[in-house]
Amino acid sequence: MSTQEKLKVSRRQFMGMSGALVLGMYLPVGKLAAKAGVSAAGKVNAFLVIAPDNSITFYNPFIEMGQGTYTSIPTLVAEELDADLSAMQIAQAPHGDDYKIMFNNTVRFTGGSLSVRSSYETMRRAGATARAMLINAAAEKWQVKASDCKTEPGFVINQSTGDKLSYGELAPLAATQTVPEDLPLKESKDFRLIGKPVKRTDSLAKATGTANFGIDTQIDGMLVAVVKQSPVFGGKVKSFDAAAVKDMPGVKWVDPIPDGVAVIADNYWHALKAIQALPVSFDEGANAKFSSAAYLQSLQDNLDTAGVNVENKGDVATALKSAETKLTADYHVPFLAHATLEPMNCTALVTDNNCTVWAPNQGADFVAGTAAGITGLPLDAITVETPFLGGGFGRRFLMDFVAQAVTLAKAHKGIPIKVVWSREEDTQHDFYRPMTAARYRAGLDANGKPVALHVTNVGEGPMGRLNPEFLADPKIDTTVVEGVEKQPYEIANHKLDYVHMPLSPVPIGYWRSVAHSVNGFIKESFIDEMAHAAKKDPVAFRLSMLSNSPRFAAVLKKAAAMADWNPSVVEKNGVKHAMGVSLHESFGSLVAQVAEVSIENKKINVHKVWCVVDCGFAVNPAIVKMQMESALAFGLSAAMGEEITMEKGRVRQTNFHTYPILMGKDMPEVETEIINSGATMGGVGEIGTPPIASAVCNALFTLTGKRIRTLPLSKTDLNA
Amino acid sequence: MTQLMINGKAYDVDVEDDMPLLWVIRDVIGFTGTKFGCGMGLCGACSIHIDGNVARSCITPVAAAKGKNITTIEGLGTPDNPHPVQQAWAESDVPQCGYCQSGQIMAAASLLKENPKPNEDDIKNGMTNYCRCGTYLQIHAAVKKASDLIGDES
């Protein structure tokens, strides 16, 4: 059952805001007692506050990192509350159990493309409940039936007299109403905001430099810390000579942090200069010799290892043996960095009794837990402030930078300390998208029909490393096989094996679309290989295996139609162009992409991408389209030039000149169509990433005859 | 003491001559709309105007800006009175995470000052700041829109 069905909307007293209607969410029975205790202590966790001054504040449990949650989530509330979205104030909810509205009230984070789809009912119910209480208050005031009242944005109207009262005027009386249960929600035909391209709420602030990001935190008396972490993963600081830098301008202290050292100064520049000058020696430990090349070799050495069987249908071995045409291909992809444009940063202030943390994060409870662990303070003594995130992409689930700020602030109680990483630290101390290798073996019959597919994925996933408790089967890391597991193509004999090869000591993490970024590339490239081996059109070949998957077929057909799909090379203005196609399901949504590419003066140009998405239902079609562009740009960026390599235990890349990200002149034109199929709502923020690399590489195959089986493309000489 | 003219106001700051303007603006004076992205002049998040020309403040020493007019995103326009480029950005919902957009807007304003009616290639090649969210198509369209807005005003 869905999370939201377990929630009950409830009214709370709101200390210090008398007369406001404050809606909180009670968690399921069993946790109620603990909640009451917190409430009695004066801490009220509200989702929605309607104040007598007519202000409406929504406490969003999901953070804004570009994906549009500060628009789409309050849209759900405003729709049912009947409020003007642009007049609502949106604040980030604090940490705490009251906001754990995901996975049966166990957790709250922003990621997994889960925000809208996991809270679609909950947020609407919060709005509907508040509206009903406002109507009931008005009915009481006017001595009429509730059914004699209606609302228009911000007001309750007396239908017989035409009188109207603002939500703010009604708030004190509304707060005394019984909380109604089992309210009906709007029918979709009555939607005013949902399903419409509602304008973002954060655009003007972000266009005028007034939007506050974590790195912009400024507190009276604040100092800035710059860190130097062990260049070798797992290394420790052996010694450092603080005296050598203590007289440099602005320098206050030199402090040890976990796996490194920090200089605390009056500003970033002074701290940076000092950390660069600081003599530090590291005990590099056991990892000083490892290289990513050797890791790749160890993955590739195990491509025929039996591993753990994930899926097995029919008899792959026999079918492969008797197949008319057999093909085998090995693929691999590199480690990747998140490279959020806002480097890791965190500000902390610790006193004897309290700790406040200002952190760009994808989970306030992770921040609070980290701070509580370091300070020894109880969770309710921790305050987490979450500003806008200058990109997240999965990086800000990890709390290494939070731990540093709290550690330093604990050592200097009463002084706010802001840790800011240099770009070089950010690049070299990420939690990387894991390197993965795969072997695909397929058999086709005499008619070119696929009869067998055997896939082996070798590597390690972030979930097994970081959150093994979430794995349904501890032996199978979903975050290595997702995207090739449960793939839709109908092939009678199919087998998927997973070989677990630890990538330790490399820190690995969740990177936009996680293993779908790997398997969307490999699976769809190999399907293309099969199509060419079968001498079939890549679109028709895919469709021939989708007779039982009409949603997949629909997005593919639509993308092909939009692109005016052509499997042959065509010449435009004397330059050869070719198209490639890709189709991938992730996070409950389907995306098909067709890319048109050319090569001029050895440079790959991706001219245009046609993109079709079926996410069930698009709450904000404008944001969905923007996310398609964003996510495919992210995937294209990686495919074109991103790669993290390690030698002597160190990351070799340092800054954007060695870890190049996509620039504007290389951004293809994008045309996106949405199919509102009515299927269960899927995610949006990540799903555009997985197909793009294969769409481009499949086009390059048509163009050059060269099959690309590793990324980034900058490593491949297409003229060779 | 170094005197700097920022957004039409004089600030006396006691900093080393080699300190990048970015950190004087952000950490010493306190305008945080200008962002830190790379520290090498690569990404453009720190873009400001010096005497009307775009500059990457993370590699511009404060000494180079003495006696010159510095404009940051806060000086370009405000939420109540946005510059046409900011207006185009806001109306078009360009920003996603938004972190790069101050720099993008400063770059765009400078580009339009040099070339009030840029064509598609002028925009594509003239806008060299990075956007990790990949809002490039929206950025390019908004530069065009801002060009129209400015044209309408003059």
Image (cartoon, coloured by chain):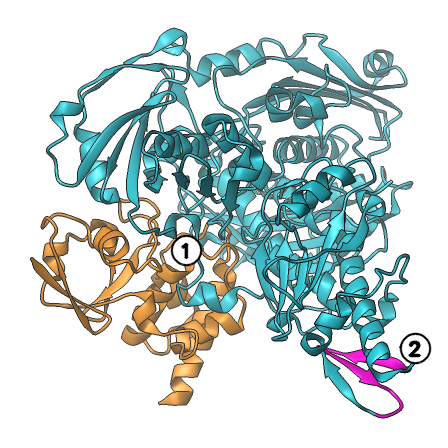
Chain colours: A cyan, B orange
Q: Chain of mark 1?
A: B
Question: Does the magenta portion include A148?
Answer: yes
Q: Residue furthest bottom?
A: A161
Task: Give the quadrant of the C terminus of chain A.
Answer: top left
Q: Amino acid at mark 2?
A: Ser
Residue A140 among those drawn in magenta: no
For label 2, the SS is helix
Q: Which residue is mark 2?
A: A147
Q: Is residue A81 left or right of residue A1?
A: left
Residue A227 rendering spot, x and y as whole percentages: 31, 31
The picture places residue A531, in percent across and down from the top left corner, at 74, 35
Tell me whether circle 2 and circle 1 mark residues in contact (CB < 8 Å).
no
SS for dot 1: loop
Q: Is residue A550 above or below residue B141?
A: above
Label 2 marks which chain's residue?
A: A
Q: Residue at x 43, y 78 (%)?
A: B80
Number of residues whose C-alpha sits closer than 10 Å to that of mark 2, classed few (under 14), some (14–19) or many (20 or more): few
Q: Is A693 situated left or right of A35 in this image? A: left
Depth check: A442 or A61 in front? A61
At which x and y percent is residue A55? Answer: 61, 71
Quadrant of the image for the N terminus of chain A?
top right
Query: Would residue B96 be visible to someone looking at this image?
Result: yes
Q: Which residue position is annotated with label 1?
A: B100
Q: Alpha-carbon neighbours of circle 1 within 10 Å: few (<14), some, or many (≥20)? A: many
Seen from the viewer's position, the closer of residues A332 and A356 is A356
Magenta stretch, residue numbers: A146-161
Q: Amino acid at mark 1?
A: Cys
Q: Position of residue A638 (x, y in %)?
A: 50, 39
The quadrant in which residue A699 appears is: top right
Give the camera-side residue of A365 and A205: A365
In the displayed structure, A214 sits above or below A322; it is below
- Quadrant of residue A543 in the image? top right
